[in-house]
Amino acid sequence: MLKISATSTVDPSAVEADAIAFGVTDPPKLSKGASALDDVLEGRLKSLLSSKEIKGGRGKLAFTHTHGLLSTSRVCVAGLGKANQLDSDALRTAAARVVASTRAGSGSRIAWLLDGALGLGVAEQARAITEGTTIASYDHGAWKTVDPRPSAIEELVFVGEDTDGVAAAAQRAAEVCTWVNHARRLVDSPGNELTPVVLAEDAENLAAQHDRLTCMVWGPDQIEAAGMGAFAAVGQGSVNESRMIVMRWQGPEAPAEPVLGLVGKGITFDTGGISIKPSSRMADMKGDMAGAAAVLGAMGAIAALDISANIIAVIAASENMPDGEAYRPGDILTAMNGKTIEVTNTDAEGRLVMADALTYCREQGATHLVDIATLTGAIVTALGDFYAGLMGNDQPWVDQIAAAAEASGDHAWQLPLHSTYRRHIGSTYADFKNSSDLRQAGSIYAASFLSEFAGSGPWAHLDIAGTGHLDRSRDDYFTEAGATGYGVRLLVELAASMSKEP
Ligand code: BES
Ligand code: MN
Ligand code: ZN
């Protein structure tokens, strides 16, 4: 994890680091701290300003070597965009550009000048910079045998006149984003390595590190015996057995209620089953456990931060394979809540495993449910790679999740869940069918289906098929294809918002 410190000073030249960084809004000008730095640099920054090499646009970066004028070898100036549009994402992106530049110069220690005059508090700035730095430091190419790897960023120093709350906010962000990166590694891991069994072992290892965290794992026989006929069917065509992973967190001094229930989709590989997917881009379906990774990562961060809340997390882990033993189109399954489901498409497997996991989580005492799943291609069409889809049965609960989403940087946008949509999941033979052949509102049909298994009480659903892993750079602080760790930050923020002292 990043080493974090904060130094209150007006003289940035005293700071020990490989790079000093600061942000500029558009049009660019030097803050008080940056001007002090420029005095030591004999006006180099002002020259870069007048030559227009320093740009204020979001994501832009200029740098200069210090040629011995400072103990630090380089200075990075990161554009933040228009001052009246400044948000945490601008700082996360700026931090990511500084990481790339510092690594290019083989540095590992970055000092950031905080600007008390920006429209965002210094602790908020430090939080966002730490998030951007940690997330941008992640390496998707862990399976490459190339040597040497680029330098890793090891240390962040925050510098400013006022550094009230800065170190604590940054420390917390570093902890959370370490778990974001853990989730990303799980999502990037291929199906031959990350099976349901291996995912369960990861959860057990985590629980072994915390007294207040427990983990229980069920195999196919227990899943079947509990009446989870929908969950059991999905994994039956794979040699890699299904696992239901249940983690419980009892936070310090947390009251008995509310109990936050987190449910994650953990399909370690989704071929589509007998309703097999086309082979182009099928490899991306190793990431069909991004919801499970978000839940696991959030539990890791919640335990590390010792958040005062009660949480029960359920992960439904299976591999969806075509095989002689696989479930088939037309099969009729009985879910744990007694409802029957006609399988019209074996590629709509996520909602089947999630249905039983939701029922179980509610039965185990969750008062407030949220599930997170790479559920539908339709959400990618609707919202792309930036906003996750958010739907639910209780507007105050949806609002609380939307607020946590915005505060955390894991953005989510609500879609409507009107009861009229429910007719599209009706079956001729059973209570429900698992997919509609209408090419419309696919994400809403999927959510309507899940709502039937959420029991009574507030429930909400996050569809992260577009945000859990990327096909290409987002040009913000996610600059490569691959896993994002979407949901870890959101779920931690949500847990904190339900705790005694957020
Ligand atoms: N795992 C997929 C959804 C998905 C698509 C995730 C793209 C990430 C990127 C899911 O299991 C699925 O196959 N959904 C089907 C449902 C359909 C058969 C009703 C879909 O969206 O096409
Ligand atoms: Mn599928
Ligand atoms: Zn799937």
Image (spheres, rainbow, N blue to C red):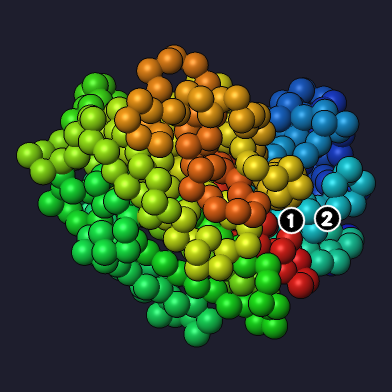
Residue found farthest to the front: 429
Task: Tell me where residue 85 appears, x and y as whole percent.
Answer: 82, 31
Q: Is residue 329 above or below residue 106?
A: above
State the image coordinates of residue 339 (x, y, percent, origin top left).
Answer: 40, 46
Q: Residue at x 33, y 55 (%)?
A: 228
Residue 160: quarter of image: bottom right
Identified at 71% across, 56% down, the residue is: 127
**SS category of the residue bearing label 1:** helix
| Residue in the image at 65% along x and 82% along y | 252
Q: Quadrant of the C terminus?
A: bottom right
Q: Is 231 in front, or is 148?
A: 231
Residue behind label 2 places its C-beta within 8 angstroms of ligand 1: no
User: Which of 247 and 459 lies nearest the eye of the viewer?
Assistant: 459
Q: Residue at x 23, y 30 (%)?
A: 330
Q: CA distance from mark 1 to mark 2?
A: 6 Å
Q: Do the numbered discs 1 and 2 sit on residues whose CB atoms are within 8 Å?
A: yes
Badge 2 amino acid: Val
Residue that mark 1 sits on = 126
Say left or right for 125 vs 357. Answer: right
Question: Does residue 304 appear to the left or right of 398 in the view shown?
Answer: left
Q: Which mark is residue 369?
A: none
Q: Which residue is disc 2 drawn over? A: 122
Judge whether residue 224 can be spotted in this image.
yes
Above or below, 495 against 97 in this view is below
